[in-house]
Image (cartoon, helix red, strand yellow):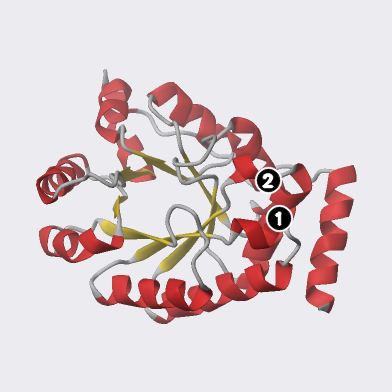
Amino acid sequence: MDRILEIVKKADYYLEEIPEPGKKLEPPEGAGIASWIDHTLLKPEATAEQIRSLCEEAQEFQFASVCVNPSFVPLVSGLLVNSGIDICAVIGFPLGATLATQKIFETLSSMDSGATEIDMVINIGALRGQGYGMVLNEIQSVAQVVHNQRGALKVILEMSYLTQKEKIIACLLSEAAGADFVKTSTGFGPGGATLEDVDLMNRIVGKSLNIKAAGGIRDYETVKAMIESGASRLGTSSGVKIVQEAIA
């Protein structure tokens, strides 16, 4: 409880006096932008053939990862073996409202199938209802599974549902729970990544966590602006178009 009280107290302080940005990043020029992008296909109607094309594109352009729903992880793992490209699975997606035990099982199953990165949606309702201990414990439990498998955990906060104070608390809870990234959104909520949210994340936890911007990122100019605001990873289904714009 003391830990939660400290986090809430810190959030109140940050509401009054926002910190300086945690990191300043320069977007790469040309094809190098691909290594900052999670090449993503999360549509419910996605087919195995589309996932195969996604993996072919990832190898051609050398994206940071391929990001898919858990059922496709075994397929992607086989297609990307020895490629050096990470395999990212989304957990509790897109609502975040499943039980923590289910998120843990889903994480372990995905990693046993070959996932190296996990993007987990927090329990948004618990956060908004001030169930901060529940959110902290959930993230901490999933982080332990991920790190035991030497993977990276990105925590999806779905910022468009949150007040400014809730955004700050969500970032601080993710930091306290041992996450590797905080991520703006699923792309399925009422809003996607904004420069204001990425900047806020950078100011709150940018010194200790990486930031992933996702949701509505469709062109190179937006990617550059997100990086300049503090994002070190971008989730998008428009990766090929973005790289082509970068090298044009």
- Amino acid at pointer 1: Arg
Circle 1 Cα neighbour tier, 10 Å, few/some/many (<14 / 14–19 / ≥20):
some
Q: Which residue is mark 1?
A: 128
In front of the other: 59 or 183? 183
Q: Could you tell me if residue 59 is visible in this image?
A: yes
- Amino acid at pointer 2: Leu
- Outermost residue on the top side: it is 248
Query: In the picture provided, is 218 more to the left or to the right than 52?
Result: right
Query: In the picture provided, is 242 more to the left or to the right than 232?
Result: left
Q: Is residue 64 above or below residue 86?
A: above
Q: Secondary structure at mark 2?
A: loop
For the N terminus, the quadrant is bottom right
Residue 4: horizontal and vertical position, in percent? Answer: 79, 71
Residue drawn 30% across and 56% down?
A: 69
Residue drawn 28% across and 59% down?
A: 87
Q: Is residue 92 above or below residue 16?
A: below
* Circle number at residue 113: none
Circle 2 Cα neighbour tier, 10 Å, few/some/many (<14 / 14–19 / ≥20):
some
Residue 216: horizontal and vertical position, in percent? Answer: 44, 31
Q: Which residue is mark 2?
A: 162
**3D distance between C-alphas at marks 2 and 1:** 7 Å
Residue drawn 79% across and 46% down?
A: 19
Q: Mark 2 or 1 closer to N-term?
A: 1
Residue 164: horizontal and vertical position, in percent? Answer: 75, 43
Residue drawn 55% across and 66% down?
A: 179
Q: Are marks 2 and 1 in contact (CB under 8 Å)?
A: yes
Q: Could you tell me if residue 150 is visible in this image?
A: no
